[in-house]
Amino acid sequence: MITLYLEGYFTPQIIIKTNHINKAVNRYIRDYHRVEMLWKYGITDID
């Protein structure tokens, strides 16, 4: 799903291709951005 997002697909297209609901797709994308931000700042261990 994130691969589709990174390839430039929009949420409605991802919903159709993955057979997921809007809420799930948005959650995956939101969580991806959270992890991306952690990596950007070098945070790899949340303990």
Image: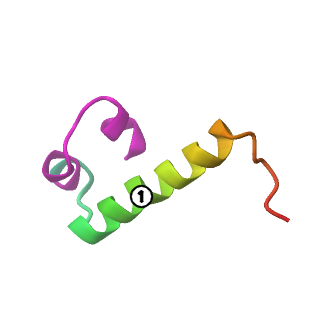
**Callout 1: helix, strand or loop?**
helix
Q: Quick check: 20 above or below 41?
A: below
Q: Quick check: 23 above or below 26?
A: below
Residue extending farthest to the top is 7
Q: What are the residue bounds of the magenta stretch? A: 1-15
Q: Main secondary structure of the magenta part?
A: helix
Point out residue 30 in the picture as x, y percentages from the top left corner. Answer: 42, 58
Residue 21 showing in the rendered view: no
Q: Is residue 41 left or right of residue 11?
A: right
Which of the pair 46/1 is nearer the observer?
46
Q: Quadrant of residue 10?
A: top left
Residue extending farthest to the right is 47
Q: Quick check: 42 above or below 24?
A: above
Q: Which residue is mark 1?
A: 30
Residue drawn at 49 percent across, 58 percent down:
31
**Figure quadrant of the C terminus:** bottom right
Residue 19 showing in the rendered view: yes
Which of the pair 20/2 is nearer the observer?
2
Amino acid type, callout 1: Arg
Point out residue 6 in the picture as x, y percentages from the top left corner. Answer: 36, 33
Point out residue 2 in the picture as x, y percentages from the top left corner. Answer: 41, 44
